[in-house]
Amino acid sequence: QLRSEQGKRYDYLVSAENGVIALPSHTGTRGLDVACVVVEHCLSGRWEMSMSQARPYPLEEVQRMSRDGATGHEIGDYCRQWYEAKGLLLTREGQVSSATSMALELLGSPSS
């Protein structure tokens, strides 16, 4: 079983990564931000993966900013402001939380 330096035991490992899916069309490219979460039960080694619901992502603007030499920090600030202006109910934290819940549900009890 996994233990911290302080001796705390952990039953599960969770890894989460958000990424962008590009959806090209004749008139432009839309971006969708999704979270992928993997949950592993430490004792059994069993694991499951789940993807979140997608959120829109300002892909074309981010690409333009990158081409124009914007820093990662500037792009991050832009994205934060973009999401705040949209007022979406689904946040990145919500994406990770829902995908984690689904992976845990798929994993079931440690003995199954």
Image (tube, rainbow, N blue to C red):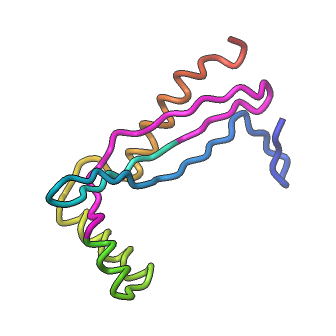
Location of the N terminus (image quadrant): top right
Tell me if 44 is positioned left or right of 39 in this view: right
Q: Residue at x 24, y 58 (%)?
A: 29
Residue 65: x and y, percent?
A: 32, 80
Q: Residue at x 71, y 30 (%)?
A: 41
In the displayed orientation, state which residue is furthest to the bottom: 69
User: Looking at the rendering, which quadrant does residue 14 occupy?
Assistant: top right
Q: Is residue 95 above or below residue 60?
A: above
In the displayed orientation, state which residue is furthest to the left: 27
Q: Residue at x 45, y 46 (%)?
A: 35
Q: Is residue 56 above or below residue 104?
A: below
In the displayed orientation, state which residue is furthest to the top: 112
Query: For the magenta stretch, what is the residue range?
Result: 37-60
Q: Residue at x 81, y 50 (%)?
A: 4
Tell me if 86 is positioned left or right of 23 in this view: left
Depth check, front residue: 12 or 56: 56
Reply yes or no: does residue 35 show up in magenta. no
Residue 89: x and y, percent?
A: 24, 48
Q: Is residue 41 above or below residue 61?
A: above
User: Looking at the rendering, which quadrant does residue 94 occupy?
Assistant: top left
